[in-house]
Amino acid sequence: MRIGIVQTEVATADFSANLRAAVQGARACVDAGAELLVASAQVLDGAFPGGLSERSSFLLQARAALQALADELSAPMLMASYAGEPGDRQTRPRPYLVGCGRVRRLTAQRVFRMSGARILAHVGPQTEIAAPEADLHVFMPTQAWHAQQQREDVTQATQLSVQGRAAVVAARSVAWADGCVLGGGSLAAARGVMRCRLPLFSAGSAVWDTETDAPSAAAHLPDVTRLLWECVCFALTRAVRQGGYRGVAVEEKGARARLLRAAADAALGGRRVHLLRAAAGSVRVRCARLQDAAERRGLLLLSGASREDFLCNAVDTALAGELAPFGDMYESEIAQLEAYAGLGEANDRQPAPEELALRALVDENRSPAEIVCQDGMDENTLRATLRRIARAAALRHTASQPVPLLVHHRAPELPRFHRLME
């Protein structure tokens, strides 16, 4: 069977634009001989619709877009949508098979047949798998992208293709919504080998023959540092485009100013990167002046704050800004990015004890007692980390109060950080 994978750029609730992109990708695959089309769960509805999925207008528009897509396709497409009738309540999209003017809603975890093959669609986190035997597993993840998650997707797909002797296809859209990223990177695997992979952070399509044994040239996965760098550049580009900004602003001597400038230059070009100099004054006043200068020029003010800055460090001008590209990264990851950008030495820096404590407490949501007993972490280090988290939270609350200096501005609030690990 020849399977066409459609990876599109989507916008939340922009059904007309999403429909056009889906039809264009589908036609390209059909022209290349695809018998079955596979798209992501967000191909029509867009990324992270949240409470919109409960509104009657959204459901009706999604249903109309679903029927319009079916009328345009000459081959069946497997996808997912929130489409439904007013009053429906659902936490995730439901799988559909559309094409040739027909819309068929599929039952979760139920195999359907096509061209003699047993096919099963999974919508949502890939870890929720309780599937019967099938010849083709189609995954449509809905969670935010992260470099480590991308590697886990590849590992899981290849392992499942060995254990079940089945082909695996994972389709993910490209999107940026409210600080979250869907990075693309759709893939196909069979017999324990990744056969096909579409590039991250860009729209595209590919046709894969389940009978072939030769992996495509683009089946390899880049290293994690390169993935993180590409994701930062993608987020900067989309934030500027969607916000209608003329460019980005970076504090001249702020935290990680060189790295911010390098990323913005790679994403937007040097002409759209502007340096700002903060005047003397208290932290709150300096933050407010930076934001005022950026707003007057129509620029997006960037923050160099890291995840550890948000969680543990005192309030500083690093926290001034509307977007923190490194706000979900730890210091060891930022050091790798600096080496990748040519701003530091390429050494294998090991995470500090404080970073390991933060990862266990915040990312893994483990209790202090569990961390001490199972990981053997120093109890004093863990207590000090907890005190720093509480102190930083109190300082952030104080810094977010209005600044009297600029009457038409509110406080230098915490920037919208670059959420990779939702």
Image (cartoon, rainbow, N blue to C red):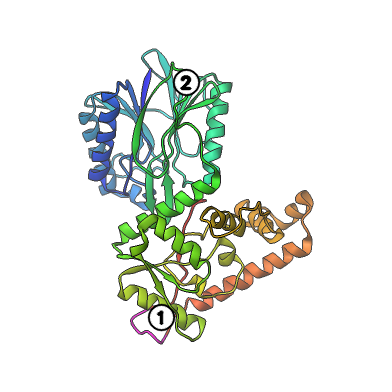
* Percent position of residue 110, x then y: 44, 24
Q: What kind of residue is marked 1?
A: Arg
Q: Quick one: 113 or 269, which is closer to the camera? A: 269
Depth check: 114 or 171 in front? 171
**Dot 2 alpha-carbon crowd within 10 angstroms: few under 14, some 14 to 19, many 20 or more:** few
- The mark that comes first in sequence, 2 or 1, is 2
Q: Nearer the viewer, residue 240 or 108?
A: 240
Query: Would residue 182 be counted in the magenta stretch?
Result: no
Which quadrant, please, contains the N terminus? top left
Answer yes or no: is residue 400 visible.
Answer: yes
Q: Is residue 367 above or below residue 168?
A: below
Q: Which residue is mark 1?
A: 289
Q: Residue furthest top?
A: 116
Residue 365: % across, % down: 63, 53
The stretch in magenta equals 404-409
Which residue position is annotated with label 2? 214
Q: Quadrant of residue 372?
A: bottom right
- Mark 2 vs mark 1: give the one in front: 2
At label 2, the amino acid type is Ala
